[in-house]
Image (cartoon, rainbow, N blue to C red):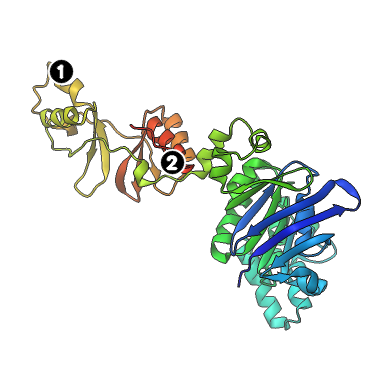
């Protein structure tokens, strides 16, 4: 079962350090949502996170988990039902991997058979073979493997809430990107209520269902979807923090939709050049897609160039003149993937597919229109 987390006008000075104070902070994390707190170092993000499991006590206000004030819950009980993942995993160095993962289930009083099964399930879940890794010590793991064990340990007691404090921050860029995607796939299956702290805007954009941009003093500047934060910064602080390249970052969080696609004329391989020329002239375009009867894209053709050649009177079929199509993208891709493919192919358009079925193409104009659509702007005509 998942729960919602609510902060209500929380104020806290963390160890008398004004830089980490959190003033009048209010935020709701919806059930099953991955909410990212992003902001400068020392802005109070970790303080906010730690108030959820009472590692930091609010000086005023309330923190509600599943509608229950955490101040009225026993600290030990609260922490046993709250998963916590930190940078560099924070594993117990004197315990083997299996014992690290088993720590919370044992505290919950599970029997040995259930604990053993849970350890194996959790290691499998994070992509570590129990037979290979259960008996290792933390110092025998790579950074990425240790972080996977940290996630497995946090999930072992099946907590409804997961707190993650820069969990991938110490990893190299390749391992970090891989673990980000693996955790997102995991979250798709588990639907935990997650609060995730980072100072990296790119990580926040990739990970979050919603992003909370926080300035010094734990002041909430904006709380919205990645597309809205990038496309419509609420304050000058947000605009400055996420940077001038926020338009490029939006490409990664904006999915392709069928309505974003341009549909050039489609002809079959057996269409004559003369017939294809009529089709493209009627559409106002200069080229046509060539597709099979079952909707597979076979190539493309510019019938005007062919028809003007003295060696052809227009009676030949386009199959003779069609050009191959470079790699396309699937409908579930992002605009970033489509734009990258355009650049890779040095092409003015990229085809989009639903499995093998050709749907249409993205062009620079339709891509721009899709970006505007993602933040509620009017589409740009093709």
Distance from disc 2 to disc 1, alpha carbons, whole Å, reads 40 Å
Q: What SS does tag 1 mark?
A: loop
Residue 136 visible in rendering = no
Q: Of tags 2 and 1, which is closer to the observer?
A: 2
Location of residue 292 by image quarter = top left
The local secondary structure at tag 2 comes to helix
- Which residue shows up at 86% across the image and 53% down it? 14
Q: Where does the image place residue 255, in percent across and percent down from the top left? A: 45, 46
Who is closer to the viewer here, 349 or 36? 36
Could you say which quadrant of the image residue 265 lies in? top left
Left/right placement of residue 185 relative to residue 143 reads left
Q: Which residue is drawn at the image coordinates 37% and 41% (left, top)?
A: 260
Q: Tell me the number on the disc at residue 373.
A: 2
Q: Looking at the image, which residue is at 57% across and 53% down?
A: 209
Q: How many numbered discs sit on the rendered protein?
A: 2
Q: Residues within 10 Å of mark 2 (few under 14, many from 20)?
A: some
């Amino acid at each position: 079962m998942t729960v919602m987390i609510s902060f209500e006008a929380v104020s806290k000075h963390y160890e008398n350090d004004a830089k980490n104070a959190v003033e009048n902070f209010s935020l709701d994390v919806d059930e099953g949502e991955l909410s990212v707190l992003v902001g400068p170092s020392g802005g109070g993000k970790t303080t906010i996170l730690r108030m959820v499991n009472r590692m930091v006590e609010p000086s005023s206000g309330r923190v509600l988990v599943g509608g229950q004030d955490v101040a009225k819950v026993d600290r030990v009980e609260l922490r046993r039902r709250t998963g916590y993942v930190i940078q560099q995993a924070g594993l117990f160095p004197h315990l083997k991997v299996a014992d690290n993962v088993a720590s919370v289930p044992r505290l919950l009083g599970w029997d040995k058979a259930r604990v053993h099964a849970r350890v194996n399930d959790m290691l499998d879940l994070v992509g570590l073979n129990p037979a290979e890794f259960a008996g290792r010590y933390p110092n025998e793991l790579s950074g990425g493997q240790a972080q996977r064990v940290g996630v497995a340990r946090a999930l072992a007691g099946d907590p409804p809430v997961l707190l993650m404090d820069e969990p991938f921050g110490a990893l190299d860029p390749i391992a970090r990107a891989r673990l980000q995607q693996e955790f997102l796939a995991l979250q798709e299956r588990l639907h935990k209520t997650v609060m995730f702290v980072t100072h990296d805007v790119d990580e926040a954009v990739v990970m979050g269902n919603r992003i909370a941009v926080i300035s010094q003093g734990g002041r909430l500047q904006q709380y919205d979807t990645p597309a809205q934060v990038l496309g419509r910064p609420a304050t000058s602080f947000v605009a400055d923090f996420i940077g001038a390249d926020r338009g490029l970052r939006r490409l990664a969080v904006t999915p392709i939709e069928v309505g974003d696609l341009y549909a050039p004329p489609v002809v079959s391989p057996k269409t004559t050049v003369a017939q294809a020329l009529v089709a493209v002239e009627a559409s106002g375009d200069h080229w046509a897609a060539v597709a099979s009867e079952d909707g597979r894209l076979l190539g493309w053709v510019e019938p005007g160039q062919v028809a003007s050649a003295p060696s052809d009177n227009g009676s030949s079929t386009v199959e003779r003149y069609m050009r191959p199509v470079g790699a396309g993208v699937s409908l579930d891709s992002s605009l970033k993937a489509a734009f990258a493919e355009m650049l890779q192919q040095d092409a003015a358009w990229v085809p989009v597919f639903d499995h093998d079925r050709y749907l249409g193409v993205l062009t620079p104009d339709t891509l721009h229109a899709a970006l505007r659509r993602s933040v509620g702007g009017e589409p740009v005509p093709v």
